[in-house]
């Protein structure tokens, strides 16, 4: 193997090229990135960068010297536009064609947008975050559409900057489907305490000049609108390639989508080796872990290792840091097993299929959290993990 | 190999402790990383590299000497 191409120059793509070199691959290594910037970190975009606490230089993931030490054929500001997996060639936006022996697809996701003529911010790239930050001035009014982790973090930052915030959420309780209604209700109270106007059960039809139009026809005035309603996998360039594309690039439990083709990061839908469930995980940690895993499998196609991490994500909202380990979405049941939601120092355990599959913690000592994380990693039966909960119905 | 931490970046995920418990720990009060061994022995290097790679906040820097 002498030619490896990695498409996508963010956390997953960078982890892949890093791991390939570390594992001894010394052939041509091309890293293609649609954005003009060298790899940078995205989680701070809705946190420290948006708040003005950090400048873009704090987000850089590798120094120029570290990047150069990787010996990359680095193609920034260049998008992949097509793939021929039979001929093993990637087509680029600058007209170049890259032959490969192995390919890693890490093209990530892009934000979903609302219909309408009015200007709307999204929050995915450095430019997005800087454009929004520029507009967050005390006394101005920001409407945030979508109270998921991203929208909630941006709302919290904006309040900290003295911005009037209206947070619009179609569900009756924010984040209920992910973290459960009791936790969602606690987060709703947290935002209201900090002066956010939170309106739930409200669908937005369109972004207009000067605000948003709701499904019931009402108008919410705002100086700025941030749309945070989820994302779409960047798989358009794979159309016609014959690769299995649905909600993302369909990969097996080794991260492989076709012979010599692997998926990593937000764009990849990977099958879990134990539960058998396919999922697409849009977490920073998952990007790095999956990049690492596919790099190893790519170099050892005869002895691949299944990719079965414990997903980890954190969210900062005001002075509360939420930390989630494992799978929370789609849970059947939850219990507060340490602390209490009201004190905002707690650990919530989530049950799926009779097992402990995830925990969400805030404000607890790391030793306590680590013990639960271990239980999640072991998919411990619920009755053992949470004895007080009794028999599973 | 020297292990350096950009402490304000640390988000207390504990991923590094799972990957390399000989080299990393967390403060009790806020979970921020503690380096137990800033110049780990070669036998630990793979695990330390893994820890740096999976840090969700890119807070661990490895300086090769």
Image: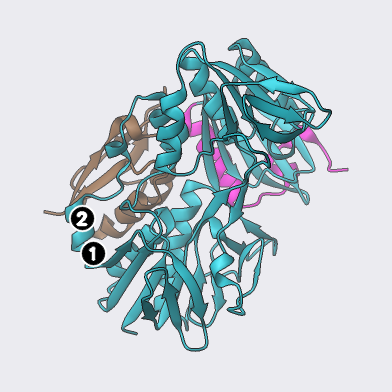
Chain colours: A cyan, B brown
Give the residues drawn in magenta, as a range: A365-393
Q: Is residue A299 magenta?
A: no
Residue hosting label 2: A66
Residue hosting label 1: A70
Do the numbered discs 2 and 1 sit on residues whose CB atoms are within 8 Å?
A: yes
B30 sits left or right of A30 in the view: right
- Would residue A363 be visible to someone looking at this image? yes
Q: Is residue A370 magenta?
A: yes
* Mark 1 crowd level (few <14, some 14–19, many ≥20, 10 Å Cα): some
Residue at left 38%, top 54%?
Answer: A35
- Would residue B31 be visible to someone looking at this image? no
Q: Quadrant of residue A1?
A: bottom left
Q: Chain of mark 1?
A: A
* Mark 2 crowd level (few <14, some 14–19, many ≥20, 10 Å Cα): few
State whether residue A82 is above or below residue A302: above
Q: Quadrant of residue A329?
A: top right
Q: Which percent across, then down, holds residue A182?
A: 74, 26
């Amino acid at each position: 193997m002498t030619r490896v191409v990695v498409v996508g120059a963010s956390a997953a793509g960078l982890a892949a090229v890093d791991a390939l070199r570390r594992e001894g691959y010394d052939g041509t290594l091309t890293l293609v990135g649609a954005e003009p910037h060298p790899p940078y970190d995205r989680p701070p975009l809705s946190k420290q960068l948006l708040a003005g606490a950090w400048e873009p230089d704090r987000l850089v993931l590798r120094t120029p010297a570290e990047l150069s030490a990787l010996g990359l054929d680095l193609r920034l500001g260049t998008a992949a536009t097509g793939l021929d997996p039979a001929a093993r060639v990637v087509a680029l936006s600058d007209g170049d064609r890259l032959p490969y022996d192995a390919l890693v697809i890490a093209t990530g996701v892009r934000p979903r947008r609302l219909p309408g003529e009015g200007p709307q911010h999204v929050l995915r790239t450095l430019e997005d975050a800087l454009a929004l930050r520029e507009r967050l001035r005390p006394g101005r009014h920001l409407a945030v559409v979508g109270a998921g982790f991203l929208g909630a973090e941006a709302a919290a930052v904006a309040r900290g900057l003295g911005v009037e915030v209206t947070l619009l959420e179609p569900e009756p309780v924010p984040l209920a489907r992910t973290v459960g209604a009791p936790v969602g209700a606690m987060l709703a109270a947290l935002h209201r305490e900090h002066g956010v106007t939170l309106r739930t059960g409200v669908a937005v039809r369109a972004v207009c000049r000067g605000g948003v139009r709701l499904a019931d026809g009402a108008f919410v005035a705002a100086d700025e609108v941030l749309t945070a309603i989820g994302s779409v996998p960047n798989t358009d360039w794979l159309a016609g390639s014959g690769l299995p594309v649905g909600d993302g690039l369909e990969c097996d439990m080794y991260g492989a989508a076709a012979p010599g083709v692997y998926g990593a990061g937000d764009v990849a839908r990977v099958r879990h080796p134990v539960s058998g469930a396919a999922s697409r995980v849009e977490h920073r940690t998952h990007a790095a872990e999956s990049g690492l895993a596919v790099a190893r499998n790519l170099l050892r196609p005869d002895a691949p290792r299944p990719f079965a991490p414990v997903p980890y994500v954190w969210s900062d909202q005001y002075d509360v840091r939420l930390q989630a380990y494992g799978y929370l979405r789609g849970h059947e049941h939850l219990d507060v097993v340490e602390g209490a939601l009201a004190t905002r120092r707690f650990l919530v355990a989530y049950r799926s299929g009779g097992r402990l599959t995830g925990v969400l913690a805030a404000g607890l000592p790391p030793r306590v959290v680590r013990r639960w994380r271990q239980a999640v990693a072991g998919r411990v039966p619920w009755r053992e993990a949470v004895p007080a909960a009794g028999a599973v119905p | 190999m020297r292990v350096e931490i950009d402490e304000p970046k640390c988000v207390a995920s504990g991923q590094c402790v799972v990957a390399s418990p000989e080299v990393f720990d967390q403060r009790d009060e806020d979970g921020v990383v503690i380096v137990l061994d800033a110049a780990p022995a070669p036998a630990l290097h793979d695990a330390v590299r893994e820890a740096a790679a999976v840090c969700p906040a890119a807070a661990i820097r490895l300086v090769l000497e």
